[in-house]
Image (cartoon, rainbow, N blue to C red):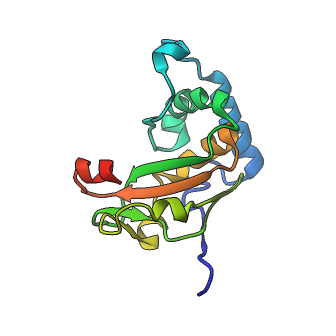
């Protein structure tokens, strides 16, 4: 069996800088400027389990994304895996689409895809679709923020087109 390929960046240079130094500087500046409008003390938040983050180019959604990811900074070193679920904009997928690759590359570094964890999901609900992931930006734009805030954690990248909410929740 041949090893799985890496997923190369599709929107570097379009949605965010292509060069690592420029990208790191932009993400760090966005994170530094992110001040929550309503600071929530930890007991109110409880353990952080979910972030809902926009996925446009950083010029449009970078400040809002940074305000969400900044909340993860205190958890660096404790989070080992991040499940990313995003919309498939370019390729229709039935059910939920796994990436079908070993790694997601970014200008800042690579993330290992946790295929073993993904394999725990019902195979009728999650099917690999490298074709859907290859051109997709919705998850890719999250990765530089994750890299800066958490480091190179394992990821489970999943795309959805029109799967019912209960199906996505089951995954």
Q: Is residue 167 visible?
A: yes
**Is 42 above or below relative to 47?**
above
- Is the residue 150 above or below the residue 6 in the image? above
Residue under the point 48% across and 20% down: 45
Residue 11, percent from left and from top: 55, 57
Judge whether residue 15 can be spotted in this image: no
Residue drawn at (41%, 71%), measured in percent from left and top? 129
Measuring 58% from the left and 48% from the top, which residue is drawn there?
81
Of residues 83 and 66, the one drawn nearer to the viewer in this rendering: 83
* Foreground residue among 98 and 10: 98
Vertical position of residue 94 compared to residue 106: above or below: below
Give the image location of residue 43, x and y in percent: 51, 14
Left or right, 165 with respect to 43, comes to left
Quadrant hosting residue 66: top right
Frontmost residue, 141 versus 153: 153
Expressed as whole percent of the image width and height from the top left, the position of residue 145 reads 61, 41
Number of residue marks: 0
Image coords of residue 167 (percent x, y): 26, 54
The quadrant of the image that shows the N terminus is bottom right
From this viewpoint, which residue is outermost toward the front?
Answer: 120
Q: Residue furthest right?
A: 21
In which quadrant of the rendered image does the C terminus lie? bottom left
Name the residue at the bottom extreme.
1
- Give residue 163's quadrant in the image: bottom left
Residue at image position (69%, 50%) is 152
């Amino acid at each position: 069996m041949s090893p799985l390929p890496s997923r190369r960046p599709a929107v570097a240079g379009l949605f965010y800088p292509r060069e690592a130094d420029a990208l790191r500087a932009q993400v760090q500046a966005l994170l530094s400027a992110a001040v929550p409008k309503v600071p929530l003390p930890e007991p109110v938040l409880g353990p952080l389990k979910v972030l809902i983050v926009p996925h446009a180019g950083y010029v449009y959604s970078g400040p809002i994304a940074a305000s969400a990811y900044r909340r993860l900074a205190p958890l660096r070193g404790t989070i080992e895996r991040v499940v990313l679920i995003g919309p498939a904009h370019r390729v229709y997928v039935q059910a939920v689409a796994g990436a079908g690759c070993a790694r997601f590359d970014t200008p800042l570094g690579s993330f290992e895809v946790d295929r073993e964890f993904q394999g725990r999901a019902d195979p009728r609900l999650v099917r690999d679709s490298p074709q859907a992931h290859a051109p997709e930006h919705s998850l890719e734009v999250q990765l530089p923020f994750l890299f800066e805030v958490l480091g190179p954690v394992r990821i489970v990248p999943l795309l959805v087109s029109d799967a019912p909410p209960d199906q996505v929740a089951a995954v």
